[in-house]
């Protein structure tokens, strides 16, 4: 749980991993339903320029509602960019503070900002006693960052010491950042990023449930996820707890899997396509056969998968993740 950096009626311990960041479109909030799921939410971002669309008293009331649950409330990076472009950064920061926001997202998803410009914004945010996130990535599918640019910008963002670095995924989760035009994860890109940085320092914007499933399967239930819809809070928590089919077999180990990205990817493929043989793993992962063989050996050694003879071909081996009883999960 969290405690907001600004004043709040509810005080909760601040989570450092497993964060759920919800996107509020200023519609669809049912307060009685949110009350039931509020303990699973760490940050609510009121999206885009919506704080300028509603009456100020309504925004203030909305922000206070979330703060009563001990939840941080973030101004969107898009709105900050809009005012930065007009040389009015101080005006929007003052307005955010007046409306009760306690967190500012600093992004350059639409415009470009230099490292020094971002650092000046950070100083202005800190001077007002506000918390901040730094977002990396472009919103236009035609101007996506290359892998070296992404790695460089994440490093620059982490040097600004934000609460977390947010990886751009937009509200639709397609054709941007780590997602292709169908909303599927670009695994090579994701693995390269998490080879360079601890995934716990990042928030992956993942508006689609299949993206949330895949990221939980890859990193475990403590992965930080953003752009979660208000209506998806409880279902996402079910995924984190392994109470849905897609993440039922996700191992809930306190120690991160240390076998490297290829091992993690092979484990992910086996979880989702089991029972599967090494030819099936190769077709699904596009990894070299020797890499797959070494990953399978590692997973067998650490008892993360089981090996069985195929009924169809006695010379072939198929792999599964070990079944886990509900009593084991309850512990």
Image (cartoon, rainbow, N blue to C red):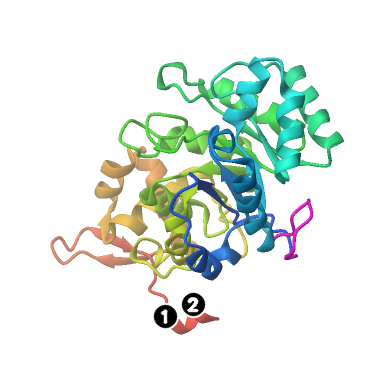
Compared across the picture, whether 187 is left or right of 275 comes to right
Indicate the position of residue 25 as horizontal and vertical percent values. 48, 44
Q: Residue at x 41, y 54 (%)?
A: 213
The tag on residue 325 is: 1
Q: Quadrant of the N terminus?
A: bottom right
71 horizontally vs 296: left or right: right
> Is residue 221 found inside the magenta-colored segment of the image?
no
Our reading of the magenta stretch's main secondary structure is loop
How far is disc 1 from disc 2 in space, using C-alphas?
6 Å
Residue 122's x, y, as percent?
Answer: 78, 30
Which residue is tagged 2? 329
The residue lying at 40 percent from left, 66 percent from top is 249
Is residue 73 left or right of 141 when viewed as pictured? right
> How many numbered circles does the render carry?
2
The span shown in magenta is 1-12
Q: SS for tag 1?
A: loop
Residue at the spot 81% in from the left edge and 29% down from the top edge: 124
Query: Tags 1 and 2 in contact by the CB under 8 Å rule?
Result: yes
The image quadrant that residue 326 belongs to is bottom left
């Amino acid at each position: 749980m969290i405690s907001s950096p600004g004043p709040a009626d509810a005080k909760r311990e601040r989570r450092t991993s497993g964060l759920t960041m919800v996107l509020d479109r200023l519609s669809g909030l049912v307060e009685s339903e949110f009350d039931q799921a509020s303990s699973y939410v760490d940050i609510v971002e009121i999206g885009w320029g919506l704080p300028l669309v509603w009456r100020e008293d309504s925004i203030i009331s909305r922000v206070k509602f979330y703060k009563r649950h001990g939840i941080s409330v973030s101004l969107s990076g898009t709105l900050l960019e809009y005012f930065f472009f007009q040389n009015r950064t101080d005006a929007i920061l003052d307005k955010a503070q007046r409306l009760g926001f306690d967190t500012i997202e600093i992004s350059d998803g639409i415009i470009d900002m230099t490292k020094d410009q971002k650092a000046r914004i950070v100083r202005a945010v800190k001077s007002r006693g506000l918390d901040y996130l730094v977002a990396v990535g472009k919103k236009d599918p035609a101007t996506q960052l290359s892998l070296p640019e992404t790695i460089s910008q994440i490093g620059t963002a982490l040097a600004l010491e934000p609460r977390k670095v947010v990886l751009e995924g937009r509200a639709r989760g397609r054709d941007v950042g780590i997602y292709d035009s169908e909303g599927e994860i670009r695994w090579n890109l994701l693995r390269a990023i998490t080879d360079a940085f601890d995934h716990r320092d990042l928030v992956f914007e993942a508006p689609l449930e299949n993206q949330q499933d895949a990221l939980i399967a890859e990193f475990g239930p403590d992965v930080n996820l953003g752009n979660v819809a208000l209506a998806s809070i409880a279902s996402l928590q079910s995924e984190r707890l392994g109470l849905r089919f897609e993440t039922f077999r996700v191992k809930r180990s306190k120690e991160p899997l240390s076998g490297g990205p290829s091992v993690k990817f092979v484990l992910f493929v086996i979880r989702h396509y089991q029972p599967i043989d090494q030819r099936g793993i190769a077709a699904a992962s596009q990894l070299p056969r020797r890499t797959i063989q070494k990953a399978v050996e590692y997973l067998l050694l650490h008892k993360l998968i089981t090996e069985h003879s195929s009924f169809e071909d006695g010379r072939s081996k198929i792999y599964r993740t070990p079944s886990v009883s509900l009593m084991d999960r309850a512990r």
